[in-house]
Amino acid sequence: MRKVSVGLIGCGTVGSGVVQIINEQRLAIMERHGVELNLKKIFTRTPCGEKSRVIHEGYPGLFVKSIDEIIEDPQIGIIIETAGGVDFPFEVAIRSIMAGKDLVTANKALLAHKGQEIFNLAGERGVEIGFEASVAGAIPIIRVTSDSLVGGQIQSITGILNGTTNFILTKMSQRQGNFKKILSLAQEKRFAEADPREDISGIDVRNKLVVLARSAFGFNLDPGSIHTEGMGEIIPADFEYAERKLGSTIKLLAHCSRDGIAFVCPTMVPMDSFLASIDDESNGLEICGLNFKKLGFSGPGAGSLPTASSIVADIVQIAKSGFRQKKVKSGKNGFDQVVPFGEVSFDHTLRFIVNDRPGIISDISSALAMEDISIRAVEQNNYRNLPRALPFLVTLHRTEEKRVQAALIEINKLSYMVKPAHVFRSLGQQD
Amino acid sequence: MRKVSVGLIGCGTVGSGVVQIINEQRLAIMERHGVELNLKKIFTRTPCGEKSRVIHEGYPGLFVKSIDEIIEDPQIGIIIETAGGVDFPFEVAIRSIMAGKDLVTANKALLAHKGQEIFNLAGERGVEIGFEASVAGAIPIIRVTSDSLVGGQIQSITGILNGTTNFILTKMSQRQGNFKKILSLAQEKRFAEADPREDISGIDVRNKLVVLARSAFGFNLDPGSIHTEGMGEIIPADFEYAERKLGSTIKLLAHCSRDGIAFVCPTMVPMDSFLASIDDESNGLEICGLNFKKLGFSGPGAGSLPTASSIVADIVQIAKSGFRQKKVKSGKNGFDQVVPFGEVSFDHTLRFIVNDRPGIISDISSALAMEDISIRAVEQNNYRNLPRALPFLVTLHRTEEKRVQAALIEINKLSYMVKPAHVFRSLGQQD
């Protein structure tokens, strides 16, 4: 039986879930995995928080006043960081590694911005970093991409990695209201954060994509180099068009491929595809590989217990591997290059909102022709009450993003455009 | 860099895929995982087989005349068994383990029937058994259930684990013909085996379920104790009813739960569910857990490269873990008890084929009432050309299997029954 003492830094939604699972699963883990987990100390910066208070009532003796008491405790082998933010967790990470402790974290912002530093130092010091919980909650996608698919030659990963935005898009696709209305509903249900900007803007997804790209391809991507679009511009009419005319729905996708393509943006996906079936707050990922075509993974991407269960799996895994102290050579320091977004090819769909008048299609098609882009179809719903500002779609033959952007500079100048055209992309036969 | 020499026993569909992947991925595995794989020797019982001949042309020097040359080679650390059958692979397994070699196998029949013996001996000898490829091909479900979900408290696993039968059921649901016609189509495409009995009868799925139950719950199940029904009795009209009247489709499911329920049988699943979306020759699994609700996994469940990629992942994993020679105490020898199938509760749907006449519903409902079973609905399609032998459905309120079976003994005696009633089950809210 291996015994391992762990210290927990951060005791909010995820941290309190870790306490609960370690408590409930202790015996089962001893029996099945031969590992005895001892949660020895807890530190929180917000002892008056709702979750901290509940845990404190159950385990008052575990709480310590300073992270030093955890980091300097020679008996503690693994430190779990669930504190949130970047600066404080970074301090925790560096000090833990320097003290020779293995580290388990769910913090994708930390790993996206400071990942290379953390992994390099961990390699030098011979400690393990567990980060299964940082992407897609309970879906064990980190272990799958880093270990289980080693023989499969992963070519690309495409995922729905944010529950809040997927909930909003799902409800919009079900005609339950516009973006603002559904966002407030989600906030009422405490489903979306009070400040949902990281979710809505795609930043949260981008951070997760950086972590995934490291796990699957060994890439060190600069988050700032990744084209990242949120979902704030999507209107209910877009779903009408997507479904009726294109047989598709709209999902906020993260995509990364072995050849260096990486982006986050709302994307048209065929209604009968795996990713279209990922509903509400669920997460889902599709992995393409030379040796297995496609694999699909779905499940809860956030929440206290789903995220905590991935943390506990990391702890057990690290404990079983037995603190091997295998020092590895320091990894790269520079960033890997992302293919400029302008050079990526898509099947584009342009949504225009115009004050209707003759000659519009002619203007748009000439501007597109100037960039050698040919139109696949022009789609316009038959509105019973024709609105003054009329939305319609133009779908294009596969072309590079930069050509479309160049054409749009001209198109957006046209006087009858109510607002700039919105671009939807579809991955099409890329994989 | 860890160097590991491997020996391959069996060089058919899967074995030749292993050779191909090791060859193509050697450098990538060195770079990403620090493991240098050296395929040192190959043995095949059928050197004139199509796949063996191709591999022999490329690597003539690797072929040996006897398994002794592999098992007794002190440089070989890992033996890959892809020979098929049970007796010969069992000999390979026992001799490999006794010789202190780690073993990687895709052989579910071997593991279902001889698993406990193999794992006990491996534990005593301190060698590893990799068997990711034995269930669900490229889907890494063994590692997921045994390691990644340790914190999740898995409660049940429900899966589509046989590509041939799922292909046939999918095509039947698409009205492409009856069972026999689609089976011949699948055989023409070399999709189904020339002798498909293990697939059709559910035996193949049952063997995989035994392996999964061990991985997820540590169970040692006697394959013979698992209720196993194939798909030979399903007729195209069943899909009509399932879809139109019940909003469901029919899948051949394997199900196992922590409380000892285990069975394989055709099952009604709601059209909008994850498992209903697993089409054609794909496999899919849904895992329910206390801490993550539901996770879904889908992908290719068979084939040369998908299966071989899981074998290669096992090899790398074992090589990385560094031959720990951790001897573990011998596991249990007896079988774990399966809940008798009669005591499992379902939402049943009975399909009758009768020579129509008045009083049928009355007879059936009285027989059911004798067993305290109440009818939920009677469903009958409006056939344009009413067939003489009329199929119709009776759906029941949730009840134990044994009550239904008792009622059916009486019902099947009724003179107007063209053949015995067919029972479809639905898991309903069980999880």
Image (tube, coloured by chain):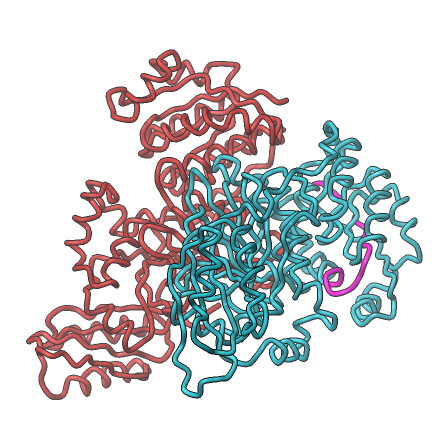
Chain colours: A cyan, B red
Q: Depth check: give the residue in front, B140 or A142.
A: A142
Image quadrant holding the N terminus of chain A, namely top right
Classify residue B42 as left or right of residue A46.
left
Q: Depth check: give the residue in front, A135 or B356.
A: A135
The answer to whether residue B344 is seen in the rendering is no
The residue at the point 58 percent across, 48 percent down is: A341
Picture layout, residue B255 above or below residue B374: above
The residue furthest top is B61
Q: Depth check: give the residue in front, A246 or A84.
A: A246
The residue furthest left is B388
User: Could you say which quadrant of the image residue A33 lies in?
Assistant: top right
The residue at the point 41 percent across, 55 percent down is: A374
Picture layout, residue B367 above or below residue B9: below
User: Could you say which quadrant of the image residue B29 lies in?
Assistant: top right
x, y percent for residue A389:
52, 80
x, y percent for residue B59:
37, 16
What is the number of callouts on the image?
0
Residues drawn in magenta: A1-16
Classify residue B60 as left or right of residue A67.
left
Classify residue A1 as left or right of residue A41.
left
**Magenta residue check for B191:** no
**Magenta residue check for A3:** yes
Picture layout, residue B45 above or below residue A219: above
x, y percent for residue A9:
82, 55
x, y percent for residue A204:
68, 58
User: Could you say which quadrant of the image residue A50 lies in?
Assistant: bottom right
The residue at the point 49 percent across, 71 percent down is: A238
The answer to whether residue A159 is seen in the rendering is yes
